[in-house]
Image (spheres, grey):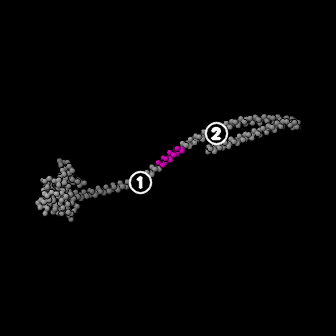
């Protein structure tokens, strides 16, 4: 027999061959018995012996020899038949064991296949997420480039704006600071962000470190400098909502002088809850 890839079909073929083999053995036994009977009948025929003479004797001798040889072959066949059946049984047992091993391997392969399918699904999901992340990355990189360019242009605009307004702002701040306080504004400087800084004892200080009154004064002067820079032609009206509330009495006179001075160029609407700050030296008129 030739090995077949399908073990179930192989087992069925072996069973059919075994059935045919046993059937052929039975038929062979019957044929041997019939042959032995025929040989015995020939030996009993006297006519054949007398007519054949020596030839008949030789025939009988050869027939006897043939009968003995056939019987020996039959006995050998029966032994070989038993041995072959044992071999077939052993082969069937081996095939059954191999089939069981194959079934176990198949179950293991099925479990491995399920695990691989789960991994494949996880990989497919990860690939989908990777595609989304890649698309998001490209969009974010595009936004980053736009923001980077925007920041660059804003820096350029800021630098241009600063260069354009730094000098007039500083001049306007110096003018209004001198009006408000009666002192020069030399220690005060504008940085690149148009923020005030004060140099004291060789160290720059932020205006946030000063008192509330000083901060109010510097803030008002800087705002007026911005108004002058933004409106060089037609002047707008200005609303003051009691901006000097944190100033002490010594600085109140300077604040009213400041209001009278800017009223020469701007229309002022001034709100206050203190009578003494609204009608000094005829300012209300």
- Measuring from the top left, give residue 181's x and y in whole percent: 14, 55
Residue at position x 59%, y 40% from top?
Answer: 100
The answer to whether residue 44 is magenta is: no
Label 2 neighbour load within 10 Å: few <14, some 14-19, many 20+:
some
Q: Does the CB distance between marks 1 and 2 fall below 8 Å?
A: no
Residue 41 left/right relative to 204:
right
Label 2 belongs to which residue? 92
Residue at (47, 50) in percent of width and height: 124
Looking at the figure, which quarter contains the C terminus? bottom left
141 vs 98, left or right, is: left
Task: List x then y, in percent, for residue 91.
Answer: 64, 38
Q: Earlier in the sequence, mark 1 or mark 2?
A: 2
Residue 221 shows in this picture: no
SS at mark 1 in the image:
helix
For the residue pair 189 and 125, the one nearer the viewer reads as 125
Name the residue tied to disc 1.
135
Q: On the image, which quarter does residue 63 sit in?
A: top right
Quarter where residue 185 is shown: bottom left
Q: CA separation, marks 1 and 2?
A: 62 Å
Image quadrant holding the N terminus, namely top right
Q: Nearer the viewer, residue 175 or 10?
A: 10
Magenta stretch: give its range. Answer: 109-122
Task: Find numbered disc 2 in the image and state the secondary structure of the residue it sits on.
Answer: helix
Q: Is residue 95 above or below residue 275?
A: above
- Identify the image quadrant of residue 194: bottom left
Q: Residue at x 55, y 43 (%)?
A: 107
Pick whichever, 131 or 15, lies toward us.
15
């Amino acid at each position: 027999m030739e090995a077949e890839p399908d073990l179930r079909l192989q087992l069925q073929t072996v069973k059919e061959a075994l059935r045919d083999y046993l059937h052929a053995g039975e038929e062979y036994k019957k044929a041997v018995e019939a042959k032995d009977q025929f040989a015995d009948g020939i030996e009993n025929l006297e006519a054949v012996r007398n007519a054949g003479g020596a030839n008949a004797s030789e025939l009988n001798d050869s027939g006897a020899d043939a009968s003995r040889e056939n019987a020996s072959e039959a006995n050998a066949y029966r032994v070989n038949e038993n041995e072959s059946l044992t071999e077939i049984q052993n082969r069937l047992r081996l095939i059954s064991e191999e089939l069981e091993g194959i079934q176990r391997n198949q179950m293991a392969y099925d479990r491995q296949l399920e695990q691989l399918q789960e991994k494949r699904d996880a990989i497919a999901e990860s690939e989908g997420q990777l595609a989304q992340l890649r698309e998001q990355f490209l969009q974010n990189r595009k936004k980053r480039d736009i923001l980077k360019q925007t920041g660059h242009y804003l820096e350029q605009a800021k630098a241009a704006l600063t260069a354009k307004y730094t000098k007039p702002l500083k001049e306007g701040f110096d003018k209004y600071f001198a009006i408000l306080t009666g002192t020069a504004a030399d220690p005060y400087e504008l940085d690149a962000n148009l923020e005030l800084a004060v140099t004291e004892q060789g160290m720059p200080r932020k205006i946030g470190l000063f008192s509330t009154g000083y901060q109010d004064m510097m803030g008002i002067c800087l705002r007026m400098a911005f108004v002058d820079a933004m409106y060089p032609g037609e002047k707008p009206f200005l609303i003051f909502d009691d901006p000097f509330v944190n100033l002490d009495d010594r600085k109140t006179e300077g604040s009213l002088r400041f209001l009278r001075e800017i009223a020469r160029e701007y229309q002022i609407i001034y709100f206050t809850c203190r009578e003494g700050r609204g009608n000094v030296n005829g300012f209300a008129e």
